[in-house]
Image (spheres, rainbow, N blue to C red):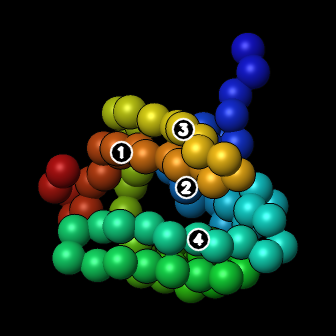
Protein backbone atom coordinates (compact mmCIF):
# COMPACT_ATOMS: atom_id res chain seq x y z
CA UNK A 1 0.00 0.00 0.00
CA UNK A 2 1.33 3.45 -0.93
CA UNK A 3 1.23 6.17 1.70
CA UNK A 4 1.49 9.89 1.15
CA UNK A 5 4.18 12.13 2.62
CA UNK A 6 1.46 13.58 4.87
CA UNK A 7 0.61 10.16 6.25
CA UNK A 8 4.27 9.33 6.84
CA UNK A 9 4.70 12.72 8.53
CA UNK A 10 1.76 12.10 10.90
CA UNK A 11 3.12 8.66 11.79
CA UNK A 12 6.59 10.14 12.45
CA UNK A 13 4.99 12.72 14.76
CA UNK A 14 3.09 9.95 16.56
CA UNK A 15 6.38 8.08 17.02
CA UNK A 16 8.02 11.33 18.21
CA UNK A 17 10.77 10.64 15.67
CA UNK A 18 12.36 14.05 15.08
CA UNK A 19 14.89 12.72 12.54
CA UNK A 20 12.13 11.14 10.45
CA UNK A 21 9.96 14.27 10.67
CA UNK A 22 12.84 16.39 9.41
CA UNK A 23 13.67 13.95 6.60
CA UNK A 24 10.12 14.27 5.24
CA UNK A 25 10.29 18.07 4.95
CA UNK A 26 11.97 19.99 2.13
CA UNK A 27 15.18 21.85 2.97
CA UNK A 28 13.32 25.13 2.42
CA UNK A 29 9.95 24.31 3.92
CA UNK A 30 7.09 26.72 4.55
CA UNK A 31 5.72 24.93 7.61
CA UNK A 32 2.47 26.38 8.97
CA UNK A 33 0.48 24.71 11.74
CA UNK A 34 -2.57 25.57 13.81
CA UNK A 35 -3.18 24.32 17.31
CA UNK A 36 -5.72 25.64 19.79
CA UNK A 37 -4.87 29.27 20.55
CA UNK A 38 -1.61 29.22 18.54
CA UNK A 39 -0.29 29.62 14.99
CA UNK A 40 3.15 28.10 14.29
CA UNK A 41 5.54 28.75 11.42
CA UNK A 42 8.96 27.40 10.48
CA UNK A 43 11.27 27.73 7.50
CA UNK A 44 13.59 24.77 8.11
CA UNK A 45 13.00 21.10 8.92
CA UNK A 46 14.88 21.51 12.24
CA UNK A 47 12.67 24.42 13.32
CA UNK A 48 9.54 22.40 12.51
CA UNK A 49 10.68 19.04 13.89
CA UNK A 50 12.75 19.99 16.92
CA UNK A 51 11.79 23.52 17.92
CA UNK A 52 8.04 23.25 17.42
CA UNK A 53 6.88 19.63 17.45
CA UNK A 54 9.32 18.06 19.90
CA UNK A 55 9.89 21.00 22.27
CA UNK A 56 6.42 22.55 22.37
CA UNK A 57 3.78 20.10 21.25
CA UNK A 58 4.85 16.90 23.00
CA UNK A 59 6.87 16.30 26.14
CA UNK A 60 9.11 13.34 26.88
CA UNK A 61 6.45 11.87 29.17
CA UNK A 62 3.58 12.19 26.67
CA UNK A 63 2.42 8.74 25.56
CA UNK A 64 0.96 8.90 22.06
CA UNK A 65 -0.81 5.55 22.26
CA UNK A 66 -3.02 5.69 19.17
CA UNK A 67 -3.52 7.45 15.85
CA UNK A 68 -7.23 8.27 15.69
CA UNK A 69 -7.30 9.85 12.25
CA UNK A 70 -5.10 11.16 9.45
CA UNK A 71 -6.32 13.40 6.65
CA UNK A 72 -4.24 14.59 3.71
CA UNK A 73 -4.79 16.85 0.74
CA UNK A 74 -2.98 18.93 -1.83
CA UNK A 75 -3.60 22.23 -3.63
CA UNK A 76 -1.03 23.04 -6.33
CA UNK A 77 2.35 22.43 -4.67
CA UNK A 78 1.05 22.75 -1.09
CA UNK A 79 0.37 19.67 1.00
CA UNK A 80 -1.98 19.56 3.98
CA UNK A 81 -2.05 16.96 6.71
CA UNK A 82 -4.32 16.78 9.73
CA UNK A 83 -4.26 14.17 12.44
CA UNK A 84 -5.70 13.28 15.81
CA UNK A 85 -3.87 11.23 18.39
CA UNK A 86 -4.83 9.57 21.64
CA UNK A 87 -2.36 10.95 24.20
CA UNK A 88 -1.83 10.16 27.88
CA UNK A 89 -0.22 12.76 30.13
CA UNK A 90 0.27 12.05 33.80
CA UNK A 91 -1.85 8.88 33.39
CA UNK A 92 -4.77 10.94 32.02
CA UNK A 93 -6.09 10.93 28.50
- Whole-angstrom CA distance, mark 1 to mark 3, is 19 Å
Q: Which mark is residue 13?
A: 2
Residue extending furthest front?
Answer: 76
Q: Quadrant of residue 1?
A: top right
The answer to which of marks 4 and 1 sits earlier in the sequence is 4
Residue 62 image offset from top left, x and y in percent: 37, 63
Residue 74 image offset from top left, x and y in percent: 59, 41
Residue 32 appears in the figure: yes
Dot 3 falls on a residue whose secondary structure is: strand
- Whole-angstrom CA distance, mark 1 to mark 2, is 10 Å
The answer to which of marks 3 and 2 sits earlier in the sequence is 2
Q: Nearer the viewer, mark 1 or mark 3?
A: 3
The answer to which of marks 1 and 3 sits earlier in the sequence is 3
Q: Which mark is residue 31?
A: 4
Q: Which mark is residue 72?
A: none
The answer to which of marks 2 and 4 sits earlier in the sequence is 2
The residue labelled by disc 3 is 73
Q: Are marks 4 and 1 in contact (CB under 8 Å)?
A: no
The residue labelled by disc 1 is 85
Label 3 crowd bin: few (<14), some (14–19), many (20+), radius 10 Å: few
Amino acid sequence: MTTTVGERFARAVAAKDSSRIQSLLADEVDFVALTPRRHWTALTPREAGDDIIMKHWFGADDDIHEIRSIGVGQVADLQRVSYRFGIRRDDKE
